[in-house]
Amino acid sequence: METERIHSFPPVIDRRARVLVLGTAPSVKSLEHGQFYGHPRNYFWGVVYGLFGAGDPDSDYKRRLAFLQEHRLAVFDVIESCVREGSLDVNIREEEPNDLPKLLEQYPGLRCFAFNGSKAYDTYRKFFRDHPALKHIAALKLPSTSPIPTQKMRNLEDRIQAWSAVLPYLEEEADGRKTPFKH
């Protein structure tokens, strides 16, 4: 039996975005729900809300997306399409990348790509390592928000602490001036 090709969702981004969070490809649960980080145990939304001391994530997906964008964050995937059985990144095959240089051209205010896990970062490097349009973008390899614990990432608090590396990029305007972000 052949595994079907899966596709990423369109990016959630607007002109305010300074940090683009990049995952690999949507999980089975995310595809079922039609939502980025749609698995209820994934730490992503808890991390986003936790970075700003905002408590538990809103139960409404549209309000979670609005919160993300109000805080100058955007979300997308490195992989436009791939073949993958199940949800594990290790099972990704035949990946085709999203056109990140074109996205950056459309949203020049982006200052940082924040990679949700090693596979997202490694895939980005595989396809875009020497791309001239991406030379000025900071690339942060962050721990995965997957619910699977690792030796260093055991819980939500561990992930929030690691992901706080994105906060300085949220304060930077497109022209390089620092403007404090109101938490």
Image (cartoon, rainbow, N blue to C red):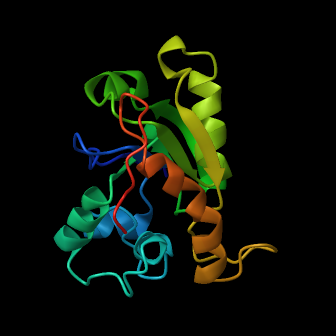
Image coordinates for residue 104, horizontal then vertical, percent: 36, 27
What residue is rendered at 26% in x and 67% in y? 67
Image coordinates for residue 99, horizontal then vertical, percent: 38, 26
Evaluate whether residue 181 shows in this view.
Answer: yes
Image position of 71 with respect to 47: above or below: above
Image coordinates for residue 118, horizontal then vertical, percent: 67, 50
What residue is rendered at 64% in x and 30% in y? 125
Which residue is nearer to you in this view: 37 or 68? 68
What residue is rendered at 71% in x and 74% in y? 153
Which residue is nearer to you in this view: 96 or 40? 40
Furthest residue toward top: 132
Evaluate whether residue 88 shows in this view.
Answer: no
Image position of 108 with respect to 7: above or below: above
Image position of 81 with respect to 137: above or below: below
Which residue is nearer to you in this view: 158 or 71? 71
* Quarter of the image that includes the C terminus: bottom left
Furthest residue toward right: 151
Image coordinates for residue 100, horizontal then vertical, percent: 41, 29
Which residue is nearer to you in this view: 22 or 30? 22
Left or right of 3? Residue 130 is right
Examine the image and state in which quarter residue 15 appears.
Answer: top left
